[in-house]
Image (cartoon, rainbow, N blue to C red):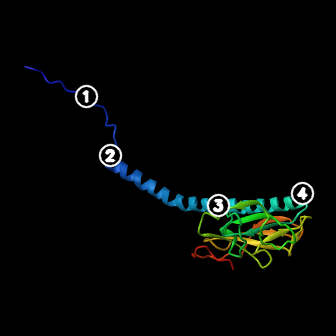
Amino acid sequence: MRQSQKKCLGPSSGFTLLELLVTITVASILLTLAVPSFNSLTQNNRRSSYVGDLLRTLAYARNQAVTSRSTITVCPSAAPYNAAPTCAANGWHTGWVVFREAGTPNGIFDAGELVLAVHEPLSNANTTICGDANLGDGITFTNAGVLRGGAGSLSYCDARGIGEGRSIIVATFGRVRSDVTTNCRRDTSSPPACS
């Protein structure tokens, strides 16, 4: 007859159901706390990127105006990648175009003018960039780097509203800077409206 051999097993190496449930509960609580912070971080990074792009574009346009001794215009455009882009007062969130004016500067892209740079539309539908009365239709730098038409500002707004927007301020002598703006309102429309 064969003798049965008993195997000695050590302590169990798996999880109990209770341990698994506690771990899942703790993980879900941590994720619930982390997701809003991650969304805010993403929105802040997007804001920094777009405002930085616009600040660099305006600095580039001013630099081109001075170095080429010509008039350079930056204007919002719904179709910045077209062969003949059009300037439109439809908001800067649709994209913008930088071009060298030929002949008498009029702030509008005309045939024969050279496109220097373009920027695609903002990728998030919940963001907008609005200009004030002086800069809403476009920004033109003279060959001396001075702003044609007077100082003004653009406001970057997203759905978070007041306190989260940024203002791009362009001084008469062409200096460009960014600051916090109160021109935004909490808005769920797409894109949000500026006040």
Q: Residue at x 34, y 50 (%)?
A: 18
Q: Amino acid at mark 3?
A: Arg
Q: Which mark is residue 67?
A: 4
**Would you name the residue on which mark 1 appears?**
8
Residue 191 percent across, percent down from the top left: 61, 73
The residue lying at 64 percent from left, 61 percent from top is: 46
Q: Is residue 53 left or right of residue 124?
A: right
According to the image, label 2 marks what residue? Answer: 16
Cα distance in 3D space between marks 2 and 3: 44 Å
Callout 1–callout 3 Cβ contact below 8 Å: no
x, y (%) of residue 184? 68, 75
Residue 164 in sight: no
Q: Earlier in the sequence, mark 4 or mark 1?
A: 1
In the shown orientation, is residue 42 left or right of residue 30?
right
The one of 53 and 177 positioned closer to us in this rendering: 53
Q: Residue at x 89, y 64 (%)?
A: 145
* Label 1 – label 3 distance at C-alpha: 60 Å
Q: Quadrant of residue 42?
A: bottom right
Task: Say which mark, if any, is on residue 46.
Answer: 3
Badge 4: residue crowd in 10 Å (few <14, some 14–19, many ≥20)? few
Label 2, label 4: how far apart the Cα atoms are: 73 Å
Against 162, residue 17 (above or below) is: above
- Label 1: which secondary element: loop
Q: Is residue 53 visible?
A: yes
Mark 2 or 3: in front is 3
What is the spatial separation of the Cα atoms under label 4 and label 3, in whole angstroms? 31 Å
Q: Disc 2 or disc 4, which is closer to the eye?
A: 4
| Residue that extends furthest to the front in the rendered view of this protein | 112
Quote the CA–CA distance across marks 4 and 1: 86 Å
Of callouts 2 and 4, the N-terminal one: 2
Other-residue count near label 3 (Cα within 10 Å), few / some / many at <14 / 14–19 / ≥20: some
User: Which circle's residue, 1 or 2, is located before the other in the chain?
Assistant: 1
